[in-house]
Amino acid sequence: MRLTVTTWNINSVRLRIDLVLRFLAEARPDVLCLQETKCPDDAFPLKAFQGSGYENIVFAGQKGYNGVAILSRFPLLTRDVMSFCERPDARHISAVLGREAGPAAGIVLHDFYVPAGGDVPDVGLNPKFAHKIDYLDELRAWGGRRVKGPAILVGDLNVAPLEHDVWSHKQLLDVVSHTPAETERLETLRGEAGWIDAARLLTPEPEKIYTWWSYRSPDWAAANKGRRLDHAWVSPDLAGTVRSVTVARHARGWERPSDHVPVTLALEL
């Protein structure tokens, strides 16, 4: 069985619902994990997605910011939401694939949206950056306890951890998302818990991988100053099943796009 799981920071699910439906029609992933839905639960466009063939949906939202959702062609069990830093932010949701998923049954899906951290990489001057560092520290503590059995962790982790995950390592060392304070924390928590970075498993450095291009660039494609902020990790027992990680770069060129693009993990189970 081939299982495909896509992660995508959509930057407002209602504003860009046509783009999500377009992607679902074209790519047909088994599972789509969204971040930054910016949508309270009572306004989530449930019927539109169910009408497109994704009957199984769990979500956690807030008005105007944050928000995560998992859409699946297979039944989803045991919806769970975790909060970090004593804030009830909608930044995590998880579910388990039901028995109808065949060999994929029992796989735990985690969908995360890590805080962006603002513009100033100083915990003393920037409360948003301080929150991000605290969040990563708490995520590290959680990550070391929870990887039991087959699991997939995806999402906008808002950190480009490796040298070739950004267009210029030297120029971005003091830019939020690529500072040592962030990159070291993310790689430490991943390594301690045993998560496997699926993209880099198949495409090791020094090859560049980007999943995000800033709105601030007048010509994002020509400048190509990207960062790899969106990740797909698998538990060690799934590492041998990873077949591809595909970045849908063309979606950045769609009308009124998100600044992130879909990233699809494919497993052969």
Image (spheres, rainbow, N blue to C red):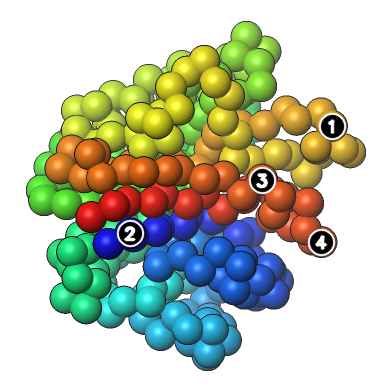
Q: Nearer the viewer, residue 25 or 40?
A: 25
Q: Determine the residue positioned at 54% across, 21% down.
A: 207
- For the residue labelled by badge 4, is the local secondary structure a helix, a strand or a loop? loop
Instruction: Look at mark 4 in the image and give the residue it sits on.
Output: 255
Q: Earlier in the sequence, mark 4 or mark 2?
A: 2
Q: Is residue 71 above or below residue 203?
A: below
Q: Is residue 260 left or right of residue 114?
A: right
Looking at the rendered image, the quarter that the C terminus falls into is: bottom left
Nearest to the observer: residue 151 or residue 131: 151
Name, please, the residue furthest toward the top: 170
In whole angstroms, how far apart are the C-alphas of marks 4 and 2? 31 Å
In the picture of the structure, the residue carrying the numbered disc 2 is 2
- Give the SS element for disc 1: helix
Mark 2 element type: strand
Q: Nearer the viewer, mark 1 or mark 2?
A: 2
Q: CA distance from mark 3 to mark 1?
A: 13 Å
Of pointers 2 and 3, the one earlier in the residue sequence: 2
Q: Dot 1, crowdedness within 10 Å: few (<14), some or many (≥20)?
A: few
Quadrant containing the N terminus in the rendered view? bottom left
Disc 1 marks which residue?
A: 222
The kind of residue on which mark 4 rests is Glu
Dot 4, crowdedness within 10 Å: few (<14), some or many (≥20)?
few
Q: Nearer the viewer, residue 57 or 119?
A: 57
Q: Which mark is residue 249?
A: 3
Q: Nearer the viewer, mark 2 or mark 3?
A: 2
Q: Give the mark nearest the N terminus, 3 or 1.
A: 1
Q: Is residue 17 visible?
A: yes
The vertical placement of 18 against 166, above or below, is below
Q: Amino acid at mark 1?
A: Ala
Q: Residues within 10 Å of mark 3 (few under 14, many from 20)?
A: some
